[in-house]
Image: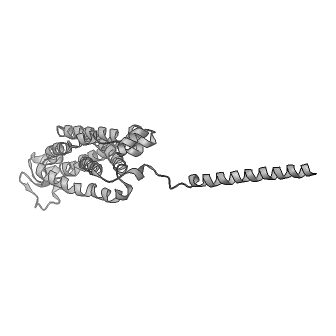
Amino acid sequence: MGSEKESKSSVRLEDDSANDERTKLQVEETPAQVKGPVKNVDDFLRIGWYTLYAGTTAEFVVFNMLSNMVFMVYSGAAPVVKSCGNFHANTTDGDICDQYSHWRAKNECVPELDYQFLSANVEFDYLCGEGKAVKNSISVQMLGVLLGTLIFGQLSDSFGRRKVLFICTIAAIILGAASSFSNSLWSLTLWRAATGCFAGGEVIVLNVYLMEQVPKNHRLWISTVVTWSPNFIILAGVAYISYDWRSLARAISLLTLPVIPLLYFSCESPRWLFQKGKIEETRKALR
């Protein structure tokens, strides 16, 4: 009996000691289990000189893509026909554009035009109803933009934001300048549609690239400053100085040239690098 009691007491002692060990382990493990909120890449971004660098780079890209998107607002501006030979705009025979085709067919007169910007309509002689061809050209160019947004968004997810944005911007600069040498509306349409395709790539990639470069607490005001609105004013001034569509196309490309070295020396998106498992490159991009 005594031995049984001793064995039972020893078992209890062993159980008690085991329970004490478990309790100690639980107490020791508790601090390790209590963790703070999980951080992501955005939490490591800080505002600084590189934020200014990224914003400046984005501004040049925004100007380029906006200018190429709305280029035909100026290049496709319809002039006002004031007269054609002995026929004048104050004629009582109806609207001048309704009579214009008859005037030219009968008299082969040279129209007198009133315009503030020498557009492709004026140079290629698309006046009044013939201006529909220019509107159709704009539609084709917008299809190019749509195609670019579909293609380059996917490519930026696969190959990187900076690389795709760099290619799109350089291509838009080159093709935009090349379009200024067009000798017909059809060639202008082809060149501008190709330019629009890469401008669409800029549109779809730039915003993501910029927002992944700046701290989340500063994204709203940065996206408000680096946006289309102020660039409309800049483009209007450039168009006023250029006066004709060929000079405007060249001026847009020329003014965007500084973005090439800026993009070349910029960092890839830290978020994209992290998603691709490039941890060391992510650390470098965050420094």
Front residue of this view, candidates 181 and 49? 49
Front residue of this view, candidates 1 and 273? 1
Look at 13% across and 62% down and name the residue there.
92
Task: Pinpoint residue 232: horizontal percent, then vertical percent.
Answer: 22, 55
Q: Count how many numbered circles sit on residues in the image.
A: 0
Look at 5% across and 53% down and name the residue there.
86
Look at 31% across and 60% down and name the residue there.
221
Front residue of this view, candidates 153 and 270? 270
Q: Quadrant of residue 148?
A: top left
Look at 13% across and 53% down and name the residue there.
240
Whether residue 272 sits left or right of residue 31 in the image: it is left
- Find the residue positioned furthest to the front: 2
Residue 165 in sight here:
yes
Task: Pinpoint residue 75: horizontal percent, then vertical percent.
Answer: 19, 48
- Find the residue positioned furthest to the left: 86
- Find the residue positioned furthest to the right: 1
Task: Pinpoint residue 166: horizontal percent, then vertical percent.
Answer: 30, 39
Quarter of the picture containing the C terminus is top left
Whether residue 130 sits left or right of residue 201 in the image: it is left
Q: Quadrant of residue 217?
A: bottom left
Residue 157 in sight here:
no
Front residue of this view, candidates 242 and 112? 242
Q: How is the image coloured?
A: one colour
Task: Pinpoint residue 213: horizontal percent, then vertical percent.
Answer: 35, 49
